[in-house]
């Protein structure tokens, strides 16, 4: 792996990120890179700093609950479907934001998104 990084030609270029803002306020950032993977990230402007003392930890709790299943998708099924394709998914909560992501092969993205959209 290291040798392939060292052998990379300096002429390989990465595109600059492009930001699009939809009328509903959703911001989409895209960037093309010379890799055979695609990563979808959903970032929410909610984190622990926005929580009153009475519900401290709620953003982090809800982050975990999104992986616990729905009426249509039993607990653990989402991860199983993602991981059987060799993809990865995870989430994190900070004081300022909560985010979720899926990284997968481009040809598997279409099959991964319906799983995620059931919770979004």
Image: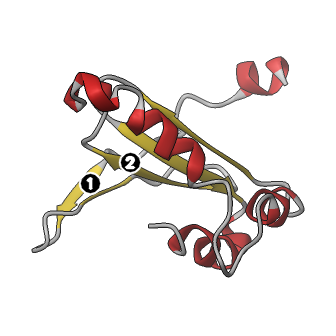
| Residue 25 left/right relative to 91 | left
Q: Which residue is drawn at 35% across and 26% down?
A: 56
Foreground pick, 96 / 34: 96
Quarter of the image with the C terminus is bottom left
Q: Is mark 1 on a helix, strand or loop?
A: strand
Q: Residues within 10 Å of mark 1 (few under 14, many from 20)?
A: few
- The residue where tag 2 is placed is 15
Quadrant of residue 86 within the rendered picture: bottom right
Residue 9 screen position, x and y as percent:
63, 31
Residue 70 screen position, x and y as percent:
63, 71
Of tags 1 and 2, the one toward the viewer is: 1
Residue 66 screen position, x and y as percent:
56, 55
Quarter of the image with the N terminus is top right
Q: Is mark 2 on a helix, strand or loop?
A: loop
Q: How is the image coloured?
A: secondary structure
Most extreme residue toward the front is 54
Foreground pick, 64 / 13: 64
Quadrant of residue 98 within the rendered picture: top left
Looking at the image, do the residues carrying marks 1 and 2 touch, with CB atoms under 8 Å apart? yes
Q: Residue at x 85, y 60 (%)?
A: 80
**Is 24 above or below relative to 21?**
below
Foreground pick, 3 / 71: 71
Residue 91 screen position, x and y as percent:
55, 40
Which mark is on residue 76?
Answer: none
| Residue 14 left/right relative to 115 | left
- The residue where tag 1 is placed is 18
Foreground pick, 76 / 5: 76
Q: Which residue is drawn at 58% across and 50% down?
A: 65
Q: Residues within 10 Å of mark 2 (few under 14, many from 20)?
A: few
């Amino acid at each position: 792996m290291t040798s392939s990084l060292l052998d990379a030609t300096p002429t390989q270029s990465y595109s600059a990120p492009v930001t699009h803002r939809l009328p509903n306020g959703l911001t989409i950032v895209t960037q093309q890179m010379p890799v055979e993977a695609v990563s979808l990230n959903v970032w929410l402007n909610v984190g622990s700093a926005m929580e009153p003392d009475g519900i401290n930890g709620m953003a982090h709790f809800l982050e975990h609950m999104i992986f616990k299943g729905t009426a249509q998708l039993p607990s653990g099924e989402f991860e199983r479907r993602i991981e059987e394709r060799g993809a990865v998914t995870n989430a994190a909560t900070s004081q300022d934001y909560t985010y979720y992501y899926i990284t997968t092969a481009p040809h598997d993205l279409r099959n991964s998104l319906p799983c995620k959209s059931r919770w979004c």
